[in-house]
Image (cartoon, grey):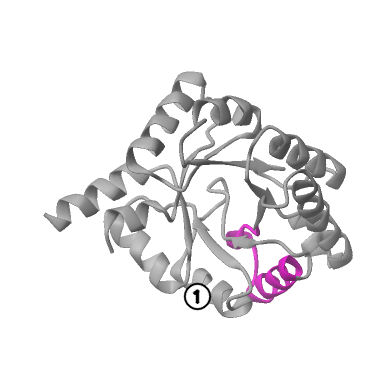
Amino acid sequence: MKSEELAKLIDHTLLKPTANFEDIDRLCDEAVKYNFYSVCVNSAFVDYAVKKLLNTPVLVCTTVGFPLGAVHKEAKAYEARKAVSQGALEVDMVINLGLLKSGDYFEVRNDIEGVVSAAKQENKDAKVKVIIETCFLSESEKVTAAKLCQEANADFVKTSTGFGTGGATVEDVKLLRMLVGNTMGVKASGGIRDLDTTLKMIEAGANRIGTSSGVAIIEELIKKSR
């Protein structure tokens, strides 16, 4: 895989709570330099990142209900709507794990549907990725979560926030790809810091990678290709 091809699979991510405007500037500059697919920032920085990336091919992705997912569904929908209205074209929402583990699948689906509807009402081209936080789920819960994401018309199912007890695994990516087939994207995120891990996730079925180590990964590939 060429570095240009790999870069277009990467959401260049900065979600730490201490991130400031200087950090966002650096993130955006790196994304333009390496031609990453998007930058992924917390929703408070969407407007700033969109203006920073104006007239570049790099999209802005943001998080909703991050990192716990345990906020009211109407709050998630509002956060998604506001972010897309400011120019974000991708929304990574966190599933309500407590409702899922309680067996309240109707409300879990409603939660996702609310974000999908809010985002696409603002911009029909907006995409919604649902973070199911695989490290906290049994295999049967992963199956259920993926099904609910499909039923709610989300665009991607995503493994992790990076704030849980574990990140993406090859096994989880393979499972999610098997479950959703070609009907949805699969985003692997959490703990992906080197080229070997990245390529394994792609081979397992991920068609988007969320990482804060995008520059190091691409530089590793460039060096290896020489």
Is residue 173 at all visible to an observer of this figure?
A: yes
Residue topped by disc 1: 174
Q: Where is residue 64 in the image (x, y as percent from the top left)?
A: 69, 43
* Residue toward you, 34 or 129: 34
Q: Going by the picture, which residue comes out furthest to the front? A: 55
Question: Label 1 crowding class (10 Å Cα cut-off): few <14, some 14-19, many 20+?
Answer: some
Residue lying at 46% horizontally and 42% vertically, measured from the top left? 57
Residue lying at 72% horizontally and 55% vertically, measured from the top left? 95
Is the residue 8 above or below the residue 181 in the image?
above
Q: In this view, does 40 lie to the left or right of 131?
A: left
Q: Position of residue 14 (x, y in %)?
A: 49, 36
Residue 197 quadrant:
bottom left
Element class at badge 1: helix
Q: Is residue 200 left or right of residue 86?
A: left
Q: Position of residue 93 (x, y in %)?
A: 68, 49
Q: In this view, does 134 lie to the left or right of 23?
A: right
Q: Position of residue 38 (x, y in %)?
A: 49, 44
Residue lying at 62% horizontally and 78% vertically, measured from the top left? 179
Q: Is residue 64 left or right of residue 173?
A: right
**Magenta residues, as a range?**
131-150
Q: In which quarter of the image is the C terminus?
A: bottom left
* Residue toward you, 124 or 13: 124
The secondary structure that most of the magenta stretch takes on is helix
Residue 156 quadrant:
bottom right
Q: Going by the picture, which residue comes out furthest to the left? A: 226
The verdict on residue 201 being magenta is no
Amino acid type for the residue under numbered disc 1: Lys
